[in-house]
Image: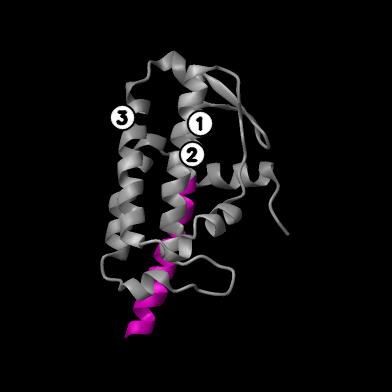
Amino acid sequence: MQETPHQYTKRILSYVQGQKPLRVQQATVKKIERLIRPLTPQELRKRPAPGKWSIGEILAHLAETELVGGYRIRMILSSNGTPIQAFDQNVWAENSNYARQDPRRSLETFRILRGANLALLKSLPRKKWRNYGMHAERGKETIARVAAMYAGHDLNHLEQIARLAKQSQRRGK
């Protein structure tokens, strides 16, 4: 059974509870680099099961999600209360052909976009963190909530990458 938007939000925010979202986001790329450093290109592209994403596909997803997040943040800053469109990550994965993208290039794209988005967030005056957009599925989301969601999203995918990397290393022994 698929999660409702409320269930998804609750789960994602639970990952980041008690942590500083920008610190989590700042650390993500280096954590991913450490996890994937020993893996071969084949291991990065290996799907754990039919219909499940490989590490490479997760990296492509993180890069595209960071692009979306940066756009959403900038729209909210430019037009308080702006509508925020939802998207189907599986449709994006298929249409952007995540399975054929170079995993290390996806990570580099993610690193660059994340750096730009963090620089913007760190430069915001406190009052701008209350600016909000109206997400099509989840309702009102402030910049602070968006930052926390992206940090939780990072931690969710870091868990997946760590699990898949560990499985690859066990198979390789």
Residue 167 vs 14, above or below: the answer is below
- SS at mark 1 in the image: helix
The answer to whether mark 2 and mark 1 are in CB contact below 8 A is yes
Coloring scheme of the render?
Answer: one colour
> How many other residues sit within 10 Å of disc 2, few (<14), some (14-19) or many (≥20)?
some
Query: Residue 23 shows which numbered tag?
Result: none
Near-viewer residue (16 or 162)? 162
Residue 45 position, x and y percent, is 41, 70
Near-viewer residue (107 or 35)? 107
Report, in whole angstroms, how far the alpha carbon at label 1 lies from the one at label 3: 15 Å
Q: Residue furthest right?
A: 1
Q: Inspect the image, locate mark 1, and give the three-letter code of the amino acid beneath it.
A: Arg
Q: Which residue is mark 2?
A: 68
Q: What residue is drawn where x is 35% and y is 40%?
A: 114
Residue 101 vs 48, above or below: the answer is above
Residue 104 position, x and y percent, is 31, 59
Report, in whole angstroms, how far the alpha carbon at label 2 lies from the one at label 1: 6 Å
> How many other residues sit within 10 Å of disc 1, few (<14), some (14-19) or many (≥20)?
many
- SS at mark 3 in the image: helix
Q: Earlier in the sequence, mark 3 or mark 2?
A: 2
Is the stretch drawn in magenta largely helix, strand or loop? Answer: helix
Residue 17, can we see it?
Answer: no
Q: Tell me which segment is drawn in magenta.
A: 153-173
Q: Which residue is mark 1?
A: 72
